Image (cartoon, grey):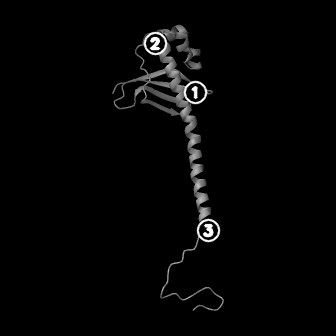
Amino acid sequence: MGAPGTDQTDNTAHSRPTWKYPGRHVLRVFIAAFAAVGALYATVWLYEFPHRCDMRRIDTVYMDFHMALHDKDYDSAYSCMSPEYRQAHSLAQFKERFGEMGERWLALEPGRYLRVRGRAARLHPGSDHWPMSGPIYEFVKVGDDWYLTGNYELSVD
């Protein structure tokens, strides 16, 4: 037997493990883990949400540009170009460079290649599977809007 005034008993013959409810400690650990996961989720969301919005805006600008060229609506297509491009090139110069490309510009595919880095982006409207042949267009963000820069490269893989 234990010392007088203590709850210690000698249960050596029939000892069973006694489980004590950890109580507040487990609750604190659970709350801390839940808060950490919530903070991580919020951080990822705060990063991804604007990024996804930018991607949708770029897709929209490209689709508007592609359709305008296809329909030979050069004023609308020209408005998709960056302010810097429009300042350096007239509508007539734009028509000369891009006017006959309407049929050759690729339609935007669901698996398109699009990379956004800060205020610049590159888009290959076709599939992002290799080999990736065709044009890769450059975009720039001015204020809250995305525009084509007029620069593109042809990838022949």
Going by the numbered disc 2, the residue's amino acid type is His
Instruction: Check residue 23 in the rendering and tell me which mark sits there, or answer none.
Output: 3
| Rendered residue at 61%/54% (across/down) | 35
* Mark seen at residue 103: none
Is the residue 96 above or below the residue 53 in the image?
above
Q: Is residue 91 visible?
A: yes
Image location of residue 120, percent across then percent down: 53, 30
Viewer-closest of 27 and 38: 27
Query: Of circles 3 and 1, which is in front?
Result: 3
Residue found farthest to the top = 92
Asked if marks 2 and 1 touch (Cβ < 8 Å), the reply is: no
Instruction: Identify the residue position indicated by label 2 in the image.
Output: 70
Which of disc 3 and disc 2 is earlier in sequence?
A: 3
Query: Which amino acid lies under the numbered mark 3 shown in the image of this protein?
Result: Gly
Binning the other alpha carbons within 10 Å of mark 2 as few (below 14), some (14 to 19) or many (20 upward) gives: some
CA distance for labels 2 and 1: 24 Å
Q: Is residue 89 visible?
A: no
Quarter of the figure that contains the C terminus: top left
Q: Position of residue 69 (x, y in %)?
A: 48, 13
Residue 19 on image: x %, y %: 54, 74
- The residues tagged by marks 3 and 1 sit, at their Cα atoms, a distance apart of 54 Å
Element at label 2: helix
Distance Cα–Cα, label 2 vs label 3: 69 Å
Residue that label 1 marks? 141
Mark 3 lies on a secondary structure that is loop
10 Å crowding of disc 3: few (<14), some (14-19), many (20+) = few
Residue drawn at point x = 57 percent, y = 40 percent: 47
Q: Is residue 64 above or below residue 123?
A: above
